[in-house]
Amino acid sequence: MVRTHWLLRWTTALAVAAAATLGVVTAQGASAATLQQVTSFGSNPGALTMWSYRPDNAASGAPLVVALHGCTQDAAGYLSGSGWRDLADRRGVTVVLPQQSTTNNSSRCFNWFQSADVTRGQGEVASIASMVRHAISAYGANPSRVYVTGLSGGGAMTASMLAAYPDLFAGGSVNAGIAHGCATTVAQAYSCMNPGVDKTPRAWGDLARAGYAAWSGPRPKVAVWHGQSDTTVTPMNGRELRDQWTDVAGVSQSPTATGTLASGVTWTEYGGGAVRLTEIVGMGHGTPVDPGSGPTQCGTAGAYFIDTVCGAHHDAQFFGLLGSPPSPTPTTSPTGSATATPTPSPTPTATSTPTCVTSTNYAHVQAGRARHSGGYALALGSNDNLGLYNTFNTSAVRETTPGYWQKC
């Protein structure tokens, strides 16, 4: 299998974080449970290492979470820093942590941009699938409650696992990641990361469905997290992921609910909870954590573990691992009407399809259909990237709910 050196722009920054990340690993964890290497777990065509963390209160039938680290990171650092160790200890969840090697990738990035590593039955995705099957068998984990999450390169690989193995996962969470199928070469990966690649929801959905074309069963629910000041993997990628997985789920890109977790941390759900996109104002490249001992806190702040909210906690809630606690308080509709809880709209009929408005991106912004950010025009509400903000680029948008515009 051909391996490549990773993208210098990504890993140069991440390499600085490695020592800091490792430095906090052993500071947590009063539980008697320890991270254990599993030396034999079945077929391993991707030559990955398997680590597992099984807390003392993990009973037979417990849920299983697969956590994929970012570049330069390792299993131990990601378990502790991301907060999944805290969630595992509190909820009796078993965590499996695949680990990349420098032999496969010089910066220990999962090879999400290599076709041979993201194709079902091959390479790294096949190794991770073997780890899941081993954990279900060896630990008695519940096969209907298996989830996958990851950061950055691990987030991109999370999307590929959901595409290649929808039969293994009930849900997934992509942190600062990239849609499945965006790149098949290193050169393409650069463009995916920054400025991002724009495709229609159907085009993204087709790429994900091709990951296991024969699959006709239920699709995993998907959470997407993205910092709005991320210059490594630009925020556009979070919205492209939303488009990919709403299309795969067969639901509209119009939101069915919105809410706020904290100041500047807003979520939008689609298809009644099939997909959730959480966007964090001012956050750069990383996964959100909230160190502390409170019931909604977790993780260790550090490089690429950013002190905002406990993403692992909210993912666990989204996946249904916490029982049925109250949902985050919904916000008002974008127009500021008195209705506090957005009401899901029925699927529009052919006669009620919103009209597409075609104009220059400059005109869209002046008319209040889009906003200007970083030289681009972004549709109001959906934040779909319409292209460069000028009087020459033309795009089409439609208003699907009052004040909520998206690309046609």
Image (cartoon, rainbow, N blue to C red):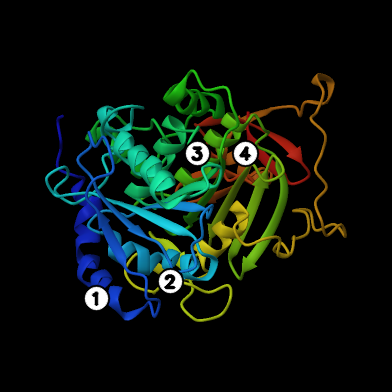
Q: Residue at x 78, y 59 (%)?
A: 332
Q: Which residue is mark 2?
A: 299
Q: Which residue is mark 3?
A: 240
The reply to whether discs 3 and 2 touch (Cβ–Cβ < 8 Å) is no
Q: CA distance from mark 3 to mark 4?
A: 24 Å
Amino acid marked by disc 1: Gly
Of pointers 3 and 4, the one earlier in the residue sequence: 3
Q: Residue at x 50, y 32 (%)?
A: 167
Q: Residues within 10 Å of mark 4 (few under 14, many from 20)?
A: some
Q: CA distance from mark 4 to mark 2?
A: 45 Å
Locate residue 347 relative to residue 88 in the image: left or right: right
Q: Residues within 10 Å of mark 1 (few under 14, many from 20)?
A: few
Q: Mark 1: which secondary structure?
A: helix
Of pointers 1 and 4, the one earlier in the residue sequence: 1
Q: Mark 4: which secondary structure?
A: helix
Of pointers 3 and 2, the one earlier in the residue sequence: 3
Q: Which residue is mark 4?
A: 363
The reply to whether discs 4 and 2 touch (Cβ–Cβ < 8 Å) is no
In this rendering, which labeled residue sits more in front, label 4 or label 2? Answer: 2
Q: Is residue 370 above or below residue 294?
A: above
Point out residue 47 in the picture as x, y percentages from the top left corner. Answer: 19, 40
Of pointers 4 and 2, the one earlier in the residue sequence: 2
The reply to whether discs 3 and 4 touch (Cβ–Cβ < 8 Å) is no
Q: Residues within 10 Å of mark 3 (few under 14, many from 20)?
A: many
Q: CA distance from mark 3 to mark 2?
A: 27 Å
Q: Residue at x 17, y 49 (%)?
A: 101
Q: Which residue is mark 1?
A: 23
- Residue 5: image quadrant is top left
Residue 227: tell me if it is visible: yes
Point out residue 37 in the picture as x, y percentages from the top left corner. Answer: 25, 57
